[in-house]
Structures are given as structure tokens and as C-alpha cells.
Image (tube, rainbow, N blue to C red):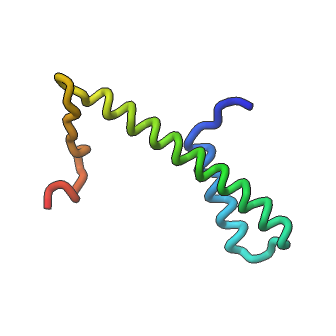
Amino acid sequence: MAKEKFEEALEKLEEIVKRMEGGEMSLEESLKAFEEGIRLSRLCAKRLDEADRRVEILLKQEGEIVTQPFAGDERETE
């Protein structure tokens, strides 16, 4: 299977959530959707962890990780 993109996996996960919240699925359909949702959730978490590690590597300066807030991040300015 080709490497699934984060955005595609997240979109599929959101669709599963909408379908399950609709309450029109049978128990078997719900279980299958839940299993797929768990798989997609883990894939998204893995991709986010990979991206986080890449950002840390890019910010590494002289052997130390220098963290900097993203522009427009209001939580850091309080």
C-alpha cells in the first residue's frame, strides 16, 4: 500500500466520525468504522511525531535544540 498522506488520513478519519455520530450504522458497520478510525488516528499521530522530529532537527543549533514559537502563536505572547 502506498504511503498515505496525513491530510488524506485526517479527512477519512473526520468522515468516519461524522458517519458514526449520525447513529445510522449497524453494530458491525460501527465496529469496522471504529477499527479503521483507530488505524487512521495512529497513522496521523505517527506522521505528526515524524514532523515534530524533523522540525527539532532543523532547529538544532550547536548541539542544542532551540525552540521558537511559530509566528502568530498568541499563547507564547501571554
Which residue is painted at 20% across and 25% down in the image?
A: 63
Count of numbered circles on the image: 0
Q: Is residue 50 above or below residue 39?
A: above
| Residue closest to the far left | 78
Counting from the top left corner in percent of width and height, residue 72 is at 23, 50
Q: Nearer the viewer, residue 17 or 53?
A: 53
Q: Nearer the viewer, residue 43 or 78?
A: 43
Quadrant housing residue 24: bottom right
Which residue is painted at 72% across and 62% down in the image?
A: 34
The C terminus sits in image quarter: bottom left
| Residue closest to the far front | 63
Counting from the top left corner in percent of width and height, residue 64 is at 19, 30
Q: Is residue 8 left or right of residue 59?
A: right
Counting from the top left corner in percent of width and height, residue 53 is at 39, 35
Q: Is residue 11 left or right of residue 22?
A: left
Q: Nearer the viewer, residue 45 or 16?
A: 45
| Residue closest to the far bottom | 23
